Every structure is written in C-alpha cells, then in structure tokens.
Image (cartoon, rainbow, N blue to C red):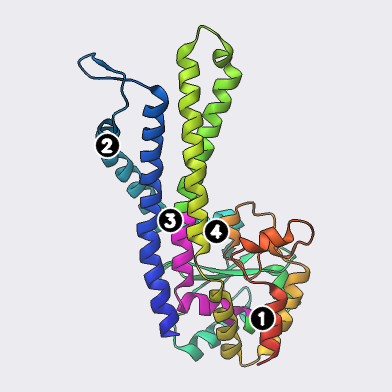
Amino acid sequence: MQTQISRNNTLSVLLLLMFPIIILAMVWVFIYVLFFVQGSYTTASGETISTFDMSLVWEEFLQVLPWVVGVVAVWFTIAYFFNASMVRHATGARPLTRKENMRVYNIVENLTMTCGMDMPQIFVVDDPQLNAYASGIDRKSYAVTLTTGLINLLDDNELAGVVGHELTHIRNRDTRLLITSIIFVGIISTIMSLTVRVMYGLLWSGGGRSRDNNNAGGALVVLVIGLICSAIAYFFGLLTRFAISRKREYMADAGGAELCGDPLALASALRKISCDPGLGQVKRDDIAQLYIIHPQGIKQGFMSFFNSLFSTHPDTAKRIEILEQF
C-alpha cells in the first residue's frame, strides 16, 4: 500500500512537470512553424528579414513565455481547488446524509473505521443504472459517489466491496493523480476547441473566401498551424495520462476485497455493474476515467480492440476473474 502511495505521489509530481512542458513545447512549435511558413520577419524598426533565423523564434518564444506560464498557472490553480464542484456538476451528484440513507452511511463509516481513514463525503447521482467513483485531492474534498441504481440493486456485501474499492483509490492517492491529469488534458482540449471555433468562424464569415482579403487568409493559416500544434500536444497529453498504470484498478479491487472481507462480493458487484453501467450520459471522457467501470469500456465491435489499447481501465472480465481466484 505504501509503495503504491509513494508511486502515485511521484507520478503526480511528474504530471505536474510534464503537462506544462507539453504546453510550452506546443507554443514553441507554433512559433517555429509560423516563422517558417511566413518566410520573412519584420523587425520593430521596419526592417524585413527574408532569411529564416532560429534566434528570432527563441526571441519570440521568450517574450510570450511569461504570459503562457501565467495563464496556465492561474487556470490550473482555479481548477485544482474547485475540482470537487466541477466533478459534481458534470455528473449531477448531490450530498447524501445519514438521515436520508442510514444503510449507505453506515457501510462507508464502518469501512473507514476498519482501515483507519477519515470519513469522506458521500454523494449520490439520481441514475437508475449502476456506477460509482471516488474524487478529491485532500481530506476536505475526498468523496465517494454512488448512483441510486447501485444503492438499490446491490446487497450490503456487494455495496461494501464497491465502497471499499473507492476508499482504496483515496488511500492510494489515485484520485489526486487523476484529477491532476484531468485538469491539464482539459486545458489542452479547451485550446483545441477554441482554435476550431475561430477557424470555423473565419471559413464561414466570407472573409476566408475573398481573394482580396489576405489578412483573413493569413489568420486562417495561423489558426491551422495552431490546431495542428494543439492536436499534437493533446495526443502527447493523452499518452502521459495513460502512463498512469491500469494497475491502480487492480490495486483498488484488491483493497476493496480486503476491506469488505469478501472478494466474491466485489466480483459479483462488478459483474452487475458491467451489465448496466450508469453515468453514461456524462460526455466528458476525462471524468469517466474516475468510474469503477468506464461505460464505454464494455462496448464490443470493430473498435473494441483499439479502445482497449487506450483505456484507463483494465478489462472487467479479467478483474472479476482475478477476484474469484482469491
């Protein structure tokens, strides 16, 4: 357990370093390609330099560097400290009190006492299907969220297994690691989205089709370059996120089975959830990686193998098989 916690803390630090590096690399490539395509550069004094000069790229990059770092830092700080409300808003979760459901509250409380951890917040999503997730970055924001379908359709032992799984994610610092990756991938995807929208506006405004409107054409070229750089950065951002080992789900399964004292109960719960996973209406895939079972991860067909290569969750059938061998 301590090894996993240490590993996740190290990965969190690496992610904090890698994502800013990816964003800065994206900016540098954008400036480089822009200068390369432009073919010339006009200095502040009005002198036109027709030869491509790498020093100019670095000069421009160093000028925009403080702005890029500042914007990303502010964006990350806001998202980091308000991540709990953002996740709840995305899934439609609401607080669950002891008075509303004594059964769920007692299960969570008993398990936290068993492993000696603080009681997390409990939230519920009004969804007749089945799913659950853990979230938060510290003791104040740690939370376990369950769907109403999960609460109603699982027996006490199965529900304890699911809650134990989510509590293990919190104990292992998995949630902090995932929230960090969600924030940075969200920053890059937002940049891509804004670039696409501006391109769309230029293409349909009429300016981009005018032969005499060179400014609009030049702006379109800049935006295309920006989109390509953003797409490359987003791809590498995803690769960095997927570097988070799927072993964390196996570790959480093992921890949940140990906490509830019944591996077969958790296996049974996973089998039921895989047949009818809830929260599929949440369109943000970065949020879906928090779920005990990714709703898209059980789809079959031509793309199932490709999706499995980039899935943040291991195969559910394999997870069940391992639990049944305990």
Numbered label attached to residue 10: none
| Residue located beneath label 4 in the image | 88
Nearest to N terminus: mark 1 or mark 3: 3
**What stretch of residues is rendered in magenta?**
162-183
| Residue located beneath label 2 in the image | 58
Could you tell whether 227 is left or right of 54 in the image? right
User: Eyeballing the image, is 318 above or below 62?
Assistant: below
| Residue located beneath label 3 in the image | 82
Q: Residue at x 39, y 22 (%)?
A: 38
Please name which of the two marks, 4 or 2, marks the residue nearer to the observer: 2
> Which image quarter is the C terminus in?
bottom right
Cβ–Cβ under 8 Å for marks 4 and 2: no
Looking at the rendered structure, the kind of residue marked 1 is Leu
Compute the Cα span from label 4 to label 2: 42 Å
Which is nearer the eye, 265 or 108?
265
Cβ–Cβ under 8 Å for marks 1 and 3: no
| Residue located beneath label 1 in the image | 159
Q: Is residue 198 visible?
A: yes
Nearest to N terminus: mark 1 or mark 2: 2
Report which quarter residue 24 is drawn in.
top left
Mark 2 is surrounded, within 10 Å at the Cα level, by few (under 14), some (14 to 19) or many (20 or more) other residues, namely: few
> Which image quarter is the N terminus in?
bottom left
**x, y (%) of residue 219?**
46, 22
Compute the Cα span from label 4 to label 1: 21 Å
Cβ–Cβ under 8 Å for marks 4 and 1: no
User: Eyeballing the image, is 198 above or below 176?
Assistant: above
